[in-house]
Image (cartoon, rainbow, N blue to C red):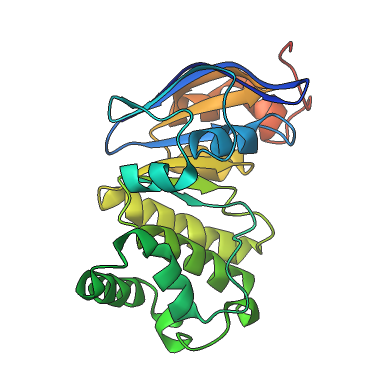
Amino acid sequence: MLTLKSVHTYYGSIHALKGVSLHVRAGEMVTLIGANGAGKSTLVNTICGLIKPRKGKIEFQSKAVEGLSPEAIVRMGIALVPEGRQVFSTLTVEANLEMGAFIHRHNGQQVREDMVRMFDRFPILKERRQQLAGTLSGGEQQMLAISRALMARPQLLVLDEPSMGLAPLVVKEIFKIIQELKQGGKTILLIEQNARAALQIADRGYVLETGKVVLQGEGAMLLEHREVQRAYLGKGAKQIWEA
């Protein structure tokens, strides 16, 4: 469904992604793990059209997407749940969901039906539908951010650090939601610092270090990999691959 081939992305003269290649098949949950500064968010922004790669190919459903605008990429079927949630804090929960459905705004009946589905999935959002998004708890805002992305009816859902800044019990609930989405057939690319939680629910994973993929494999295999355990599961060195 999604394929990156030798993607290089720069911030000015800074070489942020150095030939990254990966793929996500339809129905899979693939996770990308790595430390701060590894290039995870740069990769997300490159896929979603917020940054243009200097070299390499990005294909979605066998169509090139590098160089397209973020709106065009959403229309193709990729929706992002951004790092830090980034809800529209001065708008109501309901208005946030409507913003997520902007590419379908001419089909009011569909938008209303999708909103009902979101409220069925997240009853707490239904209770707070007229509440300003900025007054929600962190976990509720993350539920809203996920729902807002789903309102676009994406074929691929990209989640960027969904556990960031949340209490452990809330993180557990968010990962349960992500797993339920996967079990419902949603294709997911999960970018996450919480390596253990991500690899436990992912079909496959990639490890990113200083802009390069240094390891890949099935989620269960990566969980047991000695170097992953040392670097990301609290058993030793912070970085053990060469740049």
Q: Where is residue 183 in the image (x, y as percent from the top left)?
A: 28, 50
The answer to which quarter of the image holds residue 208 is top right
Q: Where is residue 234 in the image (x, y as percent from the top left)?
A: 73, 36
Q: In this figure, what is the number of numbered marks?
A: 0
Looking at the rendered image, the quarter that the N terminus falls into is: top left
Q: Is residue 40 above or below residue 126?
A: above
For this orientation, the residue located farthest to the top is 242
User: Which residue is depicted at the point 64% across and 41% down?
Assistant: 193
The answer to which quarter of the image holds residue 146 is bottom left
User: Which residue is depicted at the point 50% across and 48% down?
Assistant: 159
Q: In this view, does 82 lie to the left or right of 118?
A: right
User: Which residue is depicted at the point 49% across and 34% down?
Assistant: 47
User: Which residue is depicted at the point 44% across and 88% down?
Assistant: 127
Near-viewer residue (94 or 221): 94
Q: Is residue 163 above or below residue 54?
A: below
Q: In this view, does 208 lie above or below 151?
A: above
Q: Is residue 92 above or below residue 39?
A: below
Q: In this view, does 26 lie to the left or right of 162?
A: left
Q: Where is residue 104 in the image (x, y as percent from the top left)?
A: 30, 62
Near-viewer residue (132 or 55): 55
Looking at the rendered image, the quarter that the C terminus falls into is: top right
For this orientation, the residue located farthest to the left is 109
Q: Position of residue 100 (x, y in %)?
A: 42, 63
